[in-house]
Image: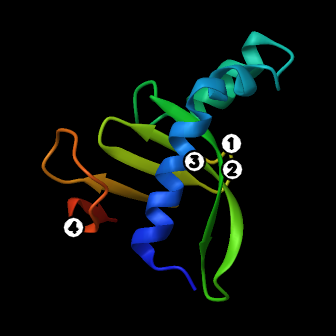
């Protein structure tokens, strides 16, 4: 069983690792600019353009199983959705204090 701090560190490492390819992967899944624009608007309605967006696997829920979630990293907030088309956030983490720092658990506030 992995601790929350370790899981968070792994998640951030995945974000950094996948950052370069995320925009290209996202754009290549749609046939038209209209379809792409609609899907982006529904997911990003609560934030401006993200630094990073991609599918990640997150562990949680009553059974504590791994679930595929659409994740967005913008400014000091990490958001996750059930799918790309989902307009409402399923959850988010907000980094307290601003600036860059280590991945210490006390610097993040779960909502």
The image quarter containing residue 22 is: top right
Tell me if label 2 and label 1 are in contact, CB under 8 Å: yes
Write down the residue under mark 4. 106
Picture quarter with the N terminus: bottom right
Label 2 to label 1, Cα distance in Å?
A: 5 Å
Label 1 to label 3, Cα distance in Å?
A: 22 Å
- Between 68 and 47, which is closer to the camera in this rendering? 68
Write down the residue under mark 2. 83
User: Picture coordinates of residue 78 (x, y %)?
Assistant: 42, 48
Secondary structure under tag 2 reads loop
Upstream in sequence: badge 3 or badge 2: 3
Q: Is residue 23 above or below residue 70?
A: above
Task: Left or right? Give the position of 26 relative to 101.
Answer: right
Q: Residues within 10 Å of mark 1 (few under 14, many from 20)?
A: some
User: Picture coordinates of residue 5 (x, y %)?
Assistant: 39, 70
Write down the residue under mark 3. 14
Upstream in sequence: badge 4 or badge 2: 2
Task: Left or right? Give the position of 27 relative to 88.
Answer: right
Residue at point 44%, 59% (across, down): 9
Frontmost of labels 1 and 4 is 4
Label 3 to label 2, Cα distance in Å?
A: 18 Å
């Amino acid at each position: 069983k992995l601790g929350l701090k370790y899981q968070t560190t792994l998640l951030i490492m995945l974000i950094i690792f996948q950052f370069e390819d995320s925009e290209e992967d996202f754009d290549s899944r749609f046939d038209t600019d209209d379809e792409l624009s609609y899907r982006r608007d529904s997911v990003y309605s609560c934030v401006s353009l993200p630094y990073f967006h991609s599918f990640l696997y997150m562990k949680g829920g009553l059974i504590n199983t791994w679930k595929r979630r659409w994740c967005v990293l913008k400014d000091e907030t990490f958001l996750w959705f059930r799918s790309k088309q989902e307009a409402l956030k399923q959850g988010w983490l907000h980094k307290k204090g601003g600036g860059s720092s280590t991945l210490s658990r006390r610097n993040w506030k779960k909502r």
